[in-house]
């Protein structure tokens, strides 16, 4: 299905971060002026906002377009309010141990499913690519690449369980352990949405 210009801009800002209007125009195959007109309309709807940032050196300040919280909310957060409420109620009524039991059960089920879909005999880059594909299918808008100095990078531009993770940090800890067990590698989280980053990013190395 063909995406509208507004949706394409939202996806671009979500996956690539703040952008110049000219860069957005290039990505959409339209002029900078047409991109600015679309961005202005989206700003009026509260989806994006321009932020002026100082350029490096003696260059003129640059105006970068950012997603607003309303723009971010266009990306699904699986039953956010209900999930957060259930977790809080469970912790209050049954104790944190009950929540930990649920998280552990989810981790075991997820690990079993990932291992059934990923060829453990493949090399690490192939395993990371397979994991990124699975996570994208699950709504995390994942990407991956290998840096020149060797480490692999996995990024997730969206978190469909963000409300649950906010209510219970154990979900984030569990996912990190699941990645390590699935890949059989050293995995460290270097950017974290819950700490204010626009994405979660992981650096992956052979153990």
Image (cartoon, rainbow, N blue to C red):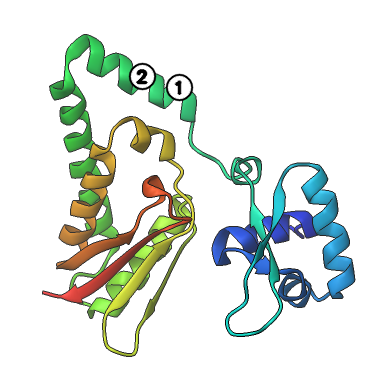
Residue 26 in the image: x percent, y percent? 76, 78
**In the picture provided, is 143 more to the left or to the right than 61?**
left
Q: How many marks?
A: 2
Q: Quadrant of the C terminus?
A: bottom left
How far apart marks 2 and 1 lie (CA) works out to 6 Å
Residue 128, located in which quarter of the rendered image?
A: bottom left
Which label is found at residue 86? Answer: 2
- Which quadrant of the figure has residue 5? bottom right
Say few, some or many: other residues with alpha carbon within 10 Å of mark 1 (under 14 / 14 to 19 / 20 or more): few
At x 62%, y 61%, the residue is: 13
Which residue is painted at 26% across and 86% down in the image? 150
Farthest left residue?
207
**Considering depth in this image, is 194 or 4 the residue closer to the camera?**
194
At a point 59% along the width and 85% down the height, the residue shown is 57
- Above or below residue 94? Residue 165 is below
- Helix, strand or loop under label 2: helix
Question: Who is closer to the viewer here, 113 or 99?
Answer: 99
Can residue 183 be seen here? The reply is no
What kind of element bears circle 1?
helix
2 in relation to 144, above or below: above
The answer to whether residue 198 of the structure is visible from this angle is: yes
Q: Residues within 10 Å of mark 2 (few under 14, many from 20)?
A: some
| Residue corresponding to mark 1 | 82
The residue that appears at 18% across and 53% down in the rendered structure is: 177
Q: Position of residue 58 (x, y in %)?
A: 64, 85
The percent position of residue 25, horizontal first and vertical second, equals 79, 73
Q: Given contact means CB atoms under 8 Å apart, are the residues at marks 2 and 1 in contact?
A: yes
Please indicate whether residue 65 sits to the left or right of residue 173 in the image.
right
Looking at this view, name the residue that lies furthest to the bottom.
148
């Amino acid at each position: 299905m063909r995406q509208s210009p507004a949706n394409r801009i939202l996806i671009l800002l979500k996956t690539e971060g703040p952008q110049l209007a000219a860069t957005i125009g290039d990505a959409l195959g339209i002029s900078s002026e047409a991109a600015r007109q679309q961005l202005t309309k989206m700003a009026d709807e509260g989806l994006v906002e321009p932020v002026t940032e100082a350029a490096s050196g003696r260059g003129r300040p640059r105006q970068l377009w950012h997603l607003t919280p309303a723009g971010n909310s266009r990306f699904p957060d699986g039953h956010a309010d209900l999930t957060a409420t259930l977790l809080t109620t469970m912790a209050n009524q049954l104790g944190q141990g009950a929540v930990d039991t649920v998280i552990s059960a989810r981790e075991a089920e997820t690990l079993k499913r990932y291992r059934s879909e990923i060829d453990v005999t493949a090399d690490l880059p192939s395993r990371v690519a397979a994991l990124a594909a699975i996570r994208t299918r699950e709504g995390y808008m994942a990407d991956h690449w290998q840096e020149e100095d060797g480490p692999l990078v996995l990024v997730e531009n969206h978190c469909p369980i963000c409300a649950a993770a906010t209510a219970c940090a154990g979900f984030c800890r569990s996912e990190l352990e699941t990645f390590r067990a699935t890949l059989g590698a050293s995995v460290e989280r270097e950017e974290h949405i819950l700490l204010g980053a626009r994405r979660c990013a992981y650096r992956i190395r052979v153990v």
